[in-house]
Amino acid sequence: MAILVHRYDAPDRFVAGTVGQPGERAFFLQAREGNRITSVACEKQQVSVLAEHLDRVLDEVVRRSSGPADVPPSTRLASDTDPLDAPITEEFRVGTMTIAWDPSIDKIVIELFSNVDVDDDADESAPPAVDPEPDEVEADEVFVVKITAAYARDFVARAQALVSAGRPPCPFCLQPLDPEGHICPRSNGYRRPLF
């Protein structure tokens, strides 16, 4: 089976963004190179984990390089705060993600694989199929982006701001609070004003 590859070796832009109001937001990762735009849907938690691991990889590159790698320090302010580019057309929903540092080009390589649906109608009495290459990811599409360390730090700052801009957590159960409030499981369903 052929895999459709969306490759961006030198994107003009690679960002995480949302569409909708807090509580109803849809999260996307989007790359643009010239007139070509690719957007993939993902979960809020995936954006958070991607940002966290990008930061870790960059810190490890700095630690191991002892000087020659051109990796800027972490920042809290993103330089790109513009909305996602239109049109936002979902190519696929992200399942598995991989991150690597390519020292030959001094760039971070991010691979986002499509979610693969598991066949629920499979015969349960049949023995499980043995995967000859267990490390290989099964996917119909893959989104490959190569970005510089400085651009990766900017992506991390924007992603962290995006994730934290959601609904505030309940001080008791830490679930997101809607503008109307919520029935807190820690209060056994009893609603009372917080302050």
Image (spheres, grey):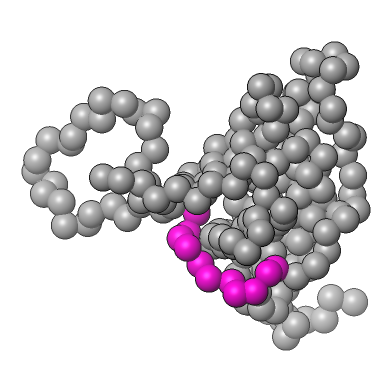
Is 117 left, or right, of 194 in this rendering?
left
Q: Is residue 156 above or below residue 193?
A: above
Instruction: Identify the residue at image location x=77%, y=15%.
Output: 64
Q: Provide residue 148's location: percent of width, then percent of height.
A: 75, 38
Q: Is residue 195 above or below residue 129?
A: below
Is 87 left, or right, of 127 in this rendering?
right
Q: Provide residue 101's location: percent of width, then percent of height.
A: 66, 28
Residue sitting nearer the eye, 142 or 115: 142
Instruction: Identify the residue at image location x=67%, y=44%.
Output: 10
Q: Is residue 149 above or below residue 13?
A: above
Residue sitting nearer the eye, 9 or 147: 9
Question: Residue 175, can we see it?
Answer: no
Q: Provide residue 6's location: percent of width, then percent of height.
A: 50, 51
User: Residue at the bottom extreme?
Assistant: 180
Is 190 left, or right, of 41 in this rendering?
right
Q: State which region is magenta.
A: 84-95
